[in-house]
Image (cartoon, grey):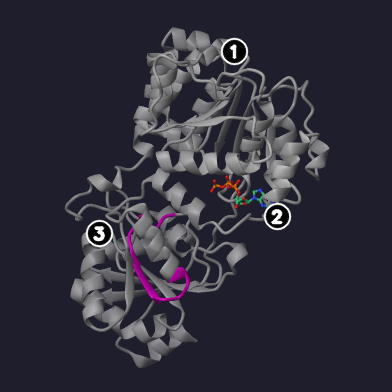
Amino acid sequence: MADWVKKAEDQEVSKLVNQLNIDGILPEKSGSNSDGNEPDVADPAETSLLIKILGKGLVNTKLSLDIQQKNPNSPLHSVKTFEALHLKPELLKGIYAMGFNTPSKIQETALPTLLADPPQNMIAQSQSGTGKTAAFVLAMLSRVNVNLNYPQVLCLSPTYELAIQTGEVAARMGQFCPEIKLRFAVRGEEVDRNKKITEHILIGTPGKMLDWGLKFRLFKMDKVSVFVLDEADVMIATQGHHDQCIRIHKMLSPECQMLFFSATYDKEVMDFARLIVSEPTIIRLMREEESLDNIKQYYVKCKNEDGKYNAIQNVYGCISIGQAIIFCHTRRTAAWLAAKMTSDGHSVAVLSGDLTVEQRLAVLDRFRSGLEKVLITTNVLSRGIDIEQVTIVVNFDLPVDVRGNADCETYLHRIGRTGRFGKSGIAINLIDGEKSMSVCSAIEKHFKKEIKILNTDSADDIEKIGS
Ligand SMILES: Nc1ncnc2c1ncn2[C@@H]1O[C@H](COP(=O)(O)OP(=O)(O)OP(=O)(O)O)[C@@H](O)[C@H]1O
């Protein structure tokens, strides 16, 4: 940690951040895509929020943990029960009141380290729904000394809504510890600038936290004993946020326990995290890999967009037996297709970047409950939002990168299935022109899996997909 402070002083880290080339990791914020004719992209913080709200309880995984430790003096052990953690009885009561009986996979290993004395730093990665938030909130609550009336725990989230979500978990878990005080440091929250902050835990966004800690000096950053960076990937990769995080981090004491949590870490972000968190225990629970096994893949040659539309018309009866998602490249295409299908009497849902998070939730809820059979979307419906019952994916436009080359990773996320959700499915790729044919061939080559031609004017062929 001391190293980091020195590097920050020397502004060496700022230089390193610039070299990390993390600006390109985050796509443009969806709201800025105003004419709808640009590729539609997901905002990672909004996606995280959606996944969180849509999540239906704990995701159980059989995958094993990858653990790396820098400090050989801190042997790692895991627990199978919450009792084994020797928590305050009120906290244990809070955990049980939330319906948690045993620790999740990541909690088994992370919690002993999170609660260890002397405190240890941690960088943890595991997919959404595996119990990360519950783990670090428990650590936050158990580290509070209620006899000291100043902020001892800071938790940073990328957005207002995500901060509120975390605060709600803390409030529920700490429901039998009324003496632990929590405050949100988010937009709209005002403080009396003549008084110091007395709450023990601050959960908020980096800008507000900086205002309170640095600009108005309403609490002492160097007295903070636990610093949590939630959604670390989004935080570090967002230009404004990572600068603010660095400034906050720089004010913390070398003894402060640093905890970074995220569902994903790009390589550059992980390198950066390792640079600023000294001697971390790194715990990674890998995501189940998607695969194209048992997915029947087809391509349909079409003349133009109208031809693609006709192809969809021809297969509609087949795709709407189950549930289908149709992916378009831009919002404009998605809106055009939805309007056309609706006017032809089909009931379709549309999800694109111009919708608010609340609207997206409503669309996804309806679709997941089967009210619509077909969902037309763009890349805003990205990885992590799993809809189990979808069996057919239509690429109205094949996924391409900024240079127009095949984006195989996105193709896999759209079409691939994980073991968890069973493996059968159908992918139909609509091709108009040589460019998209070459993208299709590149995808075929990449995955070494045949994509068969389908003639949607032939009843025999249509029957083939259904069988
Ligand atoms: N040990 C547990 N037993 C039962 N349920 C749990 C346990 N830990 C967490 N949960 C529940 O599982 C769900 C996911 O947990 P949590 O939000 O902590 O996961 P997460 O990894 O932080 O997900 P995200 O990245 O989406 O925030 C929540 O509904 C939470 O209440």
Direction from residue 71 to residue 13 in the image, left or right:
left
- The local secondary structure at tag 2 comes to loop
Q: CA distance from mark 1 to mark 2?
A: 37 Å
Label 1: how many Cα within 10 Å (few below 14, some 14–19, many 20+): some
Q: CA distance from mark 2 to mark 3?
A: 38 Å
Quarter of the image with the N terminus is top right
Q: Residue at x 27, y 55 (%)?
A: 354
Residue 164 image offset from top left, x and y in percent = 47, 41
Q: Which residue is mark 2?
A: 62
Q: Which residue is mark 1?
A: 254
- The local secondary structure at tag 1 comes to loop
Magenta segment, prevailing SS (helix, strand or loop): loop
Q: What label does residue 331 carry, if any?
A: 3
| Corner quadrant of residue 195 | top left
Q: Which is nearer the N-term, disc 1 or disc 3?
A: 1
Residue 33 image offset from top left, x and y in percent = 22, 48
Residue type pointed to by label 1: Pro
Q: Residue at x 29, y 48 (%)?
A: 30
| Corner quadrant of residue 151 | top right
Label 3: how many Cα within 10 Å (few below 14, some 14–19, many 20+): many
Residue type pointed to by label 3: Arg
Task: Say if residue 282 shows up in the picture.
Answer: yes
